[in-house]
Image (tube, helix red, strand yellow):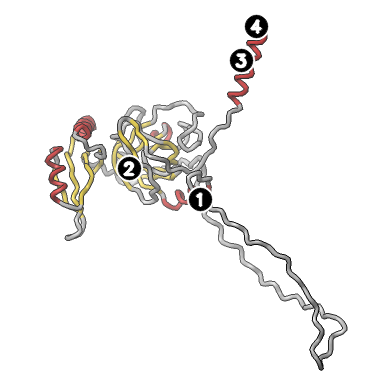
Amino acid sequence: MPRQAIALAALLALSACAQPQPAPRYLVGAPYQMGGVWSYPREDFGLTETGLAVVSADTRAGRRTANGEIHDPAALMAAHRTLQMPAVLRVTNLETGLELDVRVNDRGPANSGRVVELSRRAAELIGIRPGGVAQVRIAVVAEASRALAAGLPNPEAPRIEVAAAPLAAVGREDLAPPPGATQASRVREARPLPVAAVAPAPAAPGAAPERLPERVNRVPPRPGRLLVEAPSFSRRDLAERMAARIGGRVEATGPRGRETFRVRIGPFGSVTEADRALEATRRAGVSEARILVD
């Protein structure tokens, strides 16, 4: 290879290495489409969901996640379709009763019939094999997640410009004493006032570390029934129309007079049956339908 070509290739390699990498940041993000389904991210510190968890197929460390962090299959990481990133999520395997906290820092799962995608290590610790799925409950750990939100740069937050007040020179003029007053020959120096001790402000709770500890808890296993649920309605007649459209049933929840009417299909005896029902529901035009555990 000519010497000039070798030098050019080396220069290109160096320039590629010099490209700035995205830094970790707090991110909600815009609506996006994945796997043919639109997702609408939003900040939610009280989210609780049930559904099916899947194990990440990405076994190599080093790539950047959706909010600029480093993916590591040996760390306790997770992907969620709509949560703010990063967030701390408590994941409970309803089949084994094992639960632990993971750090949500990516978008997924690619299969929209799954509620969360876990790193290899997180899945292993709560008893989910690579390639498998499990019934889970997920819940945002609010305090730790808020600390993360406060501790990282947020490119989506508007910058508020505060104009400084203009400064003007302060004039001084010595006036003659009023008639009958005796002017002191010198100005006494004021005695310094005692300075009150100021207690330090309480420290804000620390953000969760980027690498969460492998702390597994055990709770009673509570596997449930797999259902497909469509969006809920405030009016029964609208819910009944939806149920007739997808072959579901209407269930009323909430106090009398303020009920919410949800539309459900199932229960199903297997994940395969639930997946088929979800696909049929979405073909009928109900893109917001999801699989849950009840």
Give the spatial CA distance, label 3 vs label 4: 11 Å
Per the image, the residue denoted by label 2 is: 97
Residue placed at 42% from the left, 27% from the top? 58
Q: Of callouts 3 and 4, which one flags the residue occurring earlier in the amino acid sequence?
A: 4
Per the image, the residue denoted by label 4 is: 2
Image quadrant in which you'd find residue 273? top left
Q: Mark 3, mark 2: which one is toward the viewer? A: 3
Q: Quadrant of the C terminus?
A: top left
Q: Mark 2, mark 4: which one is toward the viewer? A: 4
- Numbered circle sitting on residue 3: none
Per the image, the residue denoted by label 3 is: 9
**Secondary structure category for the residue under label 2:** loop
Looking at the image, is 188 positioned above or below residue 9?
Answer: below
Q: Mark 1, mark 2: which one is toward the viewer? A: 1
Per the image, the residue denoted by label 1 is: 150
Give the spatial CA distance, label 1 vs label 2: 32 Å
Looking at the image, is 157 positioned above or below residue 121?
Answer: below
